[in-house]
Image (cartoon, grey):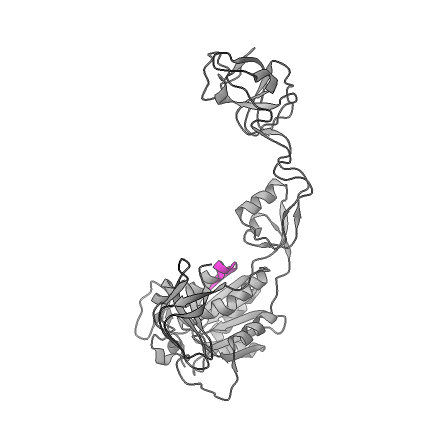
Amino acid sequence: MTGSTEHSTTPSACCDAGADPAPAARLWTVDEHLADVLASVGPLPAIELQLLDAQGCRLDEDVVADGDLPPFDNSSMDGYAVRTADTEGATDTYPSVLSVVGDIAAGAGELPRVGPGQAARIMTGAPLPPGARAVAPVEWTDGGTGTGVAAAAMTAPVPDEEVRVLRPVAEGAHIRRRGSDVTAGDRVLDAGTRLGPAQLGLLAAIGRATVKVRPRPRVVVLSTGSELVQPGEPVGPGRITDSNSFTLTAAAQEAGAIAYRVGAVPDEADRLRAVLEDQLGRADLIVTSGGVSVGAYDVVKEVFESYGGVDFRRLRMQPGKPQGFGRIGGAAGVPLLALPGNPVSAYISFELFVRPVIRTMLGAAEVHRPVVRALCPAALRSPAGRRQFLRGRYSAADGTVEPVGGAGSHLVGALARANCLITVPEDVTALPAGSEVDVVLLDS
């Protein structure tokens, strides 16, 4: 099969649709292949990273707070720090008139003491001064204007200022207590937690500048085939636009990896070998599409087999029968997953085999997509001895799934409308309408 037929839109050209080229060769089940692949990989070694570099990674340690959060009692409002006893019975008509003994801004070090009949003007986040028992929001006061009318904003301090508090203030009102969020010694994040914006903010808040994580795997994605052109370039006779490298790079990123799209490599052994040598230094995983069937011009096998340790096999599945797996550079080399070239075959192969590898490298607790049972109103047919993966639309509202498009491995329009894969087991060739089926959720 040539590189062009690997990407052909003609179903008969797809290796999934043709007869087995080597009937005596072993056919692997999906489960056997997946188990073999996952047995060879594990979580990447933990490293210490700066906080922003750790986004999307999973913690390799429990994080315990060294101190309290907030670290001190502070005001949650702009207003006046007061003694509650001084505001009892205050009204608009009979306000509590207090002497302002100072101003406290956020970050203030020296704090005035608030005694009987006194108040200190305070800003949001500023530490509560000694003697104060609550904060009267500025809206509950005249803002120190002496007008007896609540002010919309606080004014600049004036000598011998007084403030009128227009309603009672309860004990502890508008105060963020020390340790009310986190107490020293609390375990605030568990090992395995994925670090998003909120988790990184918490780490910064408790004073952590770095954190020990499982790094995001670096995945190099490339398509093979001399027939491929880049999006936006003219598509001449026998040529086709490379979509696989975009689909698989996006899928790798969505799975949690740092993905590098290399693009299309022509069917030339020297070119492919040069690209691989150039990419090996930055790859934790290499994913290719195309060139894994039995075509005369499929150079992927030739190049990968020259490295040793790469096995090309056929699976009892449709689409995605031809698969390649191994390591480039021996047992300690970079893992390689070589996928079929037809777009749907490549994507389904990614979901079934590559995504679990990425999730395993991340140290994720769940490496597989969730599977649910659903009723399928349509009758289904499947080839004997193959596990069929049909594209579908699953509705959680009524627990049903509808097939989308046909079974062809070139139908990218139908793939784009699907949110799940409908699974038909190897020993089932037909399911009547209304059957219950396993559904792999892709939008989870």
Task: Establish if 357 lies above or below 295.
Answer: above
Q: Nearer the viewer, residue 334 or 94?
A: 94
Q: Is residue 179 magenta?
A: no
- Residue shown at the point (45%, 82%) measured from the top left: 294
Q: Is residue 259 magenta?
A: yes
Q: Where is residue 441 in the image (x, y as percent from the top left)?
A: 45, 63
Residue that sits furthest to the front in the current view? 434
Q: Where is residue 91 in the image (x, y as percent from the top left)?
A: 50, 15
- Residue shown at the point (39%, 80%) measured from the top left: 17
Q: Where is residue 410 in the image (x, y as percent from the top left)?
A: 36, 72
Q: In this view, does 289 lie to the left or right of 120?
A: left
How many badges with numbers are in the image?
Answer: 0
Asked where in the image residue 118 lies, by quadrant, the reply is top right
Q: Position of residue 307 (x, y in %)?
A: 57, 76
Task: Establish if 68 lies above or below 98.
Answer: below
Q: Which of 200 and 397 is in front in this view?
A: 397
- Residue shown at the point (61%, 62%) measured from the top left: 43
The reply to whether residue 262 is in sight is: no
Q: Nearer the viewer, residue 2 or 178?
A: 178
Q: In this view, does 81 lie to the left or right of 298?
A: right
Q: In which quarter of the image is the N terminus?
A: bottom left
The boundaries of the magenta stretch are: 252-262
The reply to whether residue 387 is in sight is: yes
- Residue shown at the point (36%, 75%) measured from the top left: 8
Residue that sits furthest to the bottom in the current view? 24
